[in-house]
Image: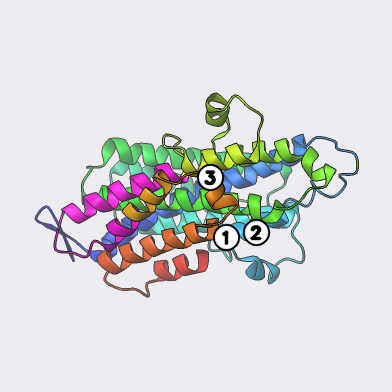
């Protein structure tokens, strides 16, 4: 148990609040990735000799949650239909939009006395629309609408939480989960971009460079902010710099790690006698990003690499679980291990 201003906040309740923030943010992130990839393929430039390069961009999306082998158990090949179904609708995929929303709703159901009525109504109505009433397959016509629905729900839920929930211990758990998930999402999107295409120097790949950079930024809702900050071409260096190290962009890793540190710091203030490992790890990672000399240190020298940063976030999440949640082998902790 953990003391909440004289009231006892049970470990299971704390864990459910934390994972509700993660699941809803995860659903939004997956929806953005799917939607932008779909639109990017439609708007892709016609480059001589580029046959096959654009149309094969669905496969790399599977590495976003590292469950390619699980995907192969249900589908023969990664194409528009199979990948969209897997990432959006499949309950067999623990990171799909549908799975994330169903898990978030189940958590919220046990938190009725801890969250506001508006928060519950928003998550319950979205669950009915996007999980219960969702089709078995998504074609090109309804993929866009489904993803927009998931994004709109996320904005509504967190807006409701910001406006109606008391900003006490429970709020800090939701905040920690949301910002850790968003930082992790940005890193995984960058990993797809720079690992899969690093070293490609063919003219065809270069001809699609700007288009792919635009798609990456849009998938993270950072394109307009990037264009207002950089008045240059969509160069990979500047895109990586903006998404990794920008201090004010709400989608950058540095920004979200700072917010994660604030949440873990607030959690530690409630009981100074508890282990502050999560706060220490978040503070250390935030300092590394804040004082990183150049973005090349990450994307070229890989000291630290993107994988190292993803592992650092997993360490913070594990420290939060160890400190505040009374059991380490809960279903949601297993879920984290499958996704990380």
Q: Which residues are magenta?
A: 253-282
- For disc 3, the neighbor class at 10 Å (few under 14, some 14 to 19, many from 20) is many
Query: Looking at the image, is mark 1 or mark 3 nearer the viewer?
Result: 3
Mark 2 touches mark 1? (CB < 8 Å): yes
Q: How is the image coloured?
A: rainbow
Can you tell which quarter of the image residue 249 is in?
top left
Q: Which residue appears at 72% of the width and 37% of the height?
A: 211
The residue at which mark 3 appears reads as: 295
Is 257 magenta? The answer is yes
Tell me how far mark 1 sits from mark 3, CA to CA.
Answer: 24 Å
Q: Residue at x 54, y 40 (%)?
A: 241
Residue occupied by mark 1: 65
Is 266 placed above or below 92 here? above
> Element at badge 2?
helix
Report whether 44 appears left or right of 238: right
- Quick check: 107 left or right of 152? left
Q: Say which of 237 and 120 sits in front.
A: 237
Let me know if residue 109 appears in the view: no
Residue 252, horizontal then vertical, whole percent = 47, 42
């Amino acid at each position: 148990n953990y003391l909440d201003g004289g009231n006892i906040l049970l470990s299971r309740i704390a864990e459910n609040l934390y994972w509700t923030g993660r699941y809803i943010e995860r659903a939004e992130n997956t929806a953005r990735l799917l939607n932008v990839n779909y639109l990017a393929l439609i708007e892709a430039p016609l480059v001589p000799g580029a046959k096959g390069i654009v149309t094969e961009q669905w496969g790399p999306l599977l590495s976003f949650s590292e469950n390619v082998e699980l995907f192969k158990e249900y589908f023969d090949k990664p194409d528009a239909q199979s990948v969209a179904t897997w990432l959006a609708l499949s309950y067999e995929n623990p990171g799909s939009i549908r799975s994330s929303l169903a898990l978030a709703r189940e958590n919220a159901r046990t938190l009725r006395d801890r969250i506001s009525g508006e928060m519950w109504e928003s998550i319950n109505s979205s669950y009915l629309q996007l999980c219960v009433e969702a089709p078995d397959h998504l074609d090109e016509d309804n993929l866009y609408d489904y993803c927009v629905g998931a994004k709109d729900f996320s904005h509504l839920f967190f807006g409701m939480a910001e406006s109606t929930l008391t900003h006490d211990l429970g709020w800090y758990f939701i905040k920690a989960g949301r910002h850790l998930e968003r930082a992790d999402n940005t890193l995984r999107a960058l990993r797809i971009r720079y690992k899969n295409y690093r070293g490609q120097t063919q003219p065809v790949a270069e001809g699609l460079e700007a288009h792919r950079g635009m798609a990456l930024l849009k998938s993270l809702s950072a394109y307009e902010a990037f264009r207002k900050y950089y008045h240059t071409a969509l160069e990979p260096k500047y895109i990586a710099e903006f998404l990794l190290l920008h201090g004010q962009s709400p989608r950058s890793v540095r920004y979200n790690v700072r917010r994660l540190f604030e949440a873990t710091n607030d959690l530690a203030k409630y009981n100074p006698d508890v282990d502050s490992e999560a706060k220490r790890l978040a503070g250390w990672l935030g300092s590394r990003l804040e004082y990183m000399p150049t973005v090349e240190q990450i994307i070229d020298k890989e000291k630290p690499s993107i994988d190292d940063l993803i592992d650092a976030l997993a360490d913070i999440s594990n420290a939060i679980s160890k400190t505040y949640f009374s059991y380490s082998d809960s279903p949601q902790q297993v879920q984290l291990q499958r996704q990380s």
